[in-house]
Image (tube, grey):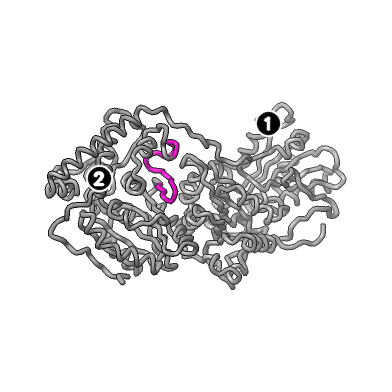
Amino acid sequence: MPRSERVVENLNAALHRVFAEDESAYLIGEDLADPYGGAFKVGKGLSTKYPGRVLSTPLSESGFVGVANGLALTGNTVFAEIMFGDFAFLAFDQLCNFAAKSVSMYGSRQELRMVVRCPVGGHRGYGPTHSQAVQKHFMGVPNLALYELTPFHDSADVFAEMVGRGEPCIHFEDKTLYGTRRWTEGTDDLFEFGFAGARREYGTAQPRVGSGDADCVIIATGGTAPLALQAARKLFLEAETVCRLVVPSRLYPLDLSPVEGMLARARRIVVVEEGVAGGTWGADVAQEIYERMWESLSGRVRLVHSDSSVIPSAAHLEREVLVQAEDIEKTVREALAR
Amino acid sequence: MLDASTTTAPRVAGPAEPADDDLELLLLIRHFELSLLDLFSAGKLNGTTHTCLGQEHVPVALGPLLGEGDYVFSNHRGHGHYLARFRDPEGLLAEIMGRQGAVCDGVGGSQHILRGRYLSTGVQGESLPVAVGTGLHLKRHEPGSLALVHIGDGTWGEGSVYEALNMAQLWRVPVVVAVENNGIAQSTPAALQMAGSIEGRVTGMGIAYRRIESCDVHDIRTAVEADVEQVRATNRPLVLEFSVPRVGPHSKGDDTRTQEELADARSRDWYEVYGRRFPEGFARADARLRERVSQVTRDVDARPLSEWRDACLAPSA
């Protein structure tokens, strides 16, 4: 795989492109002004180049998502940044009761071009209120589409797709990905990287030699994709197990059709996410798989997620709670053993 | 400038005879609301509704101060706001009754209406930050236009109000907040739900504020006209606090106030005040509008059910 740009650089470039091409684009959130450029630097340079369209706000998640709603209502393209995804709960009313419902509750479709970006997830020692993978809490809201940053996808494409929906979207961004390098199409020593779906809905990775059907398809969210790849490499090297990794750009509404054939032919299916147990995204994916291909399945879908727990601060405790590559590996081994 | 200052509208000896147009509109709203309560009693309305009985003069007074480019954000008690802007009792009643001709196909109902630059929604305080975003857009693209938000006294318990006012003042956003303070939040008197005062909270942020006691639409207009023009000229937000009586229940049959409290509310009702002062002209207009609303009600009640024509909504996955 050729050396590629870092994920955060790709995100930053994608935002710059939106701003250059769309004069109605806004970025709103806390601490966005240069030289800071946002807590994770995703918005760097924007406030210098487009001073009137980057709004660095008071600590007011509900308020500034509401302001984003007003800007979207009047026809602008709005990106809002929640500093830590956990804080998105403060804006739940504006997101669900206003943004999502406004698309349809006035009888005819009201277009809103709005993307709320949420850095999520643990492994950084930030503790219980700054580490949660909050995706599942926003599942199933009509007209609120959920996307997640992946190492595969070019954020410029994903941003264009979200804006094009004309309805509010949340873009979850696993903090551990920001500093890593993107996975570009091609091959490394063991794996081949590509996409499935006409619109590249899913990133895929599989062993170069495993051209036949996979022993196991691992469906993993963007943030857990590196862990799943790590597990897949180990399984291939140690046990010659062929795992095919499938990583969706969009979590909800879920559309499995681009990977349906691959899933139907797999011996086992494992779904991985970082969110904690209970009401998980994976449970929804499993149910969708059962609905679509119950007859052809050769085993139940296995779910991997974090423990039902707050996310502790201390590294050794956090590690116990969060999904690790070993958990994925163990689940695949167990699934194939039966 | 009345920035950060406290000003009370001048007290007048008594209201002047209202202009025909104002009186028509006041009575249209009054009889519309009374008709809704009748329809409820007759079991003809689904869900709930909140009438603005006693508060009709606020949107009627502010109406002529607004231009077509201005946005109006309304709340759960919004029938008067809608009628003052559009004078469309048929469309509103059809919306509330789920009949053909409904403004939003009956999906939104009493509390959720979008028509042009008018939007209502049913969660307290939610519209204020949205109005700030709207105001930012107007400031950039249509300077001189503003966003007007109607809220109640109970709304001041919501944190969104302060987040929005803070940003509006920080960023100089042309937003006017019309507070209809009827002294009671559903069943809870203001004294049990508000520490301090609206004035203290608003002026603490340096935001222009004016209190209006009068229920006379001409007096109100005279008192606030220059303030509203200042918002257009300077992009500074403004809070207008109207002391109003809530003559009816919160929604329907849920009034827990004493007879004395209700009598006090009625004595401050523009309907009583105008009726006492100008009995003849008032009685004629009152009878005319009662009959008009009665016709509208019969007409809408007889219509077929509304259809949700655009129920699709989500782009295909």
Q: Is residue A267 left or right of residue B250?
A: right
| Residue B210 to residue A233: above or below | below
Q: Is B282 in the magenta?
A: no
User: Residue drawn at (57%, 41%), measured in percent from left and top?
Assistant: B314
Q: CA distance from mark 1 to mark 2?
A: 61 Å
Out of A229 and A167, give the one closest to the viewer: A167
| Residue B114 among magenta residues | yes
Subunit under mark 2: B
Instruction: Say which quadrant the C terminus of chain A sits in.
Output: top right
Which mark lies nearer to you, 1 or 2?
2
Q: Is residue B231 left or right of residue A152?
A: left
Image quarter for residue B281? top left
Specify start and end residues of the magenta stretch as a single range.
B104-120
Q: Quadrant of residue A36?
A: bottom right
Residue B159 visible in image:
no
Q: Amino acid at mark 1?
A: Arg
Q: Which residue is mark 2?
A: B24
Give the answer, above or below, for where B217 lies relative to B307: below
> Which amino acid lies under the numbered mark 2 shown in the image of this protein?
Glu
Give the structural element (helix, strand or loop) at label 1: helix
In the figure, residue B29 lies in which quadrant?
top left
Whole-percent x, y for residue A332 in the image: 74, 41
Q: Residue furthest right?
A: A209
Which residue, given by chain and number where applicable, does mark 1 sit on? A292
Near mark 1 (Cα within 10 A), the count class, few <14, some 14-19 or many ≥20, is some
Could you say which is closer to the camera, residue B140 or residue B16? B16
Q: Residue at x 39, y 53 (%)?
A: B72
Q: Is residue A186 left or right of residue A174?
A: right
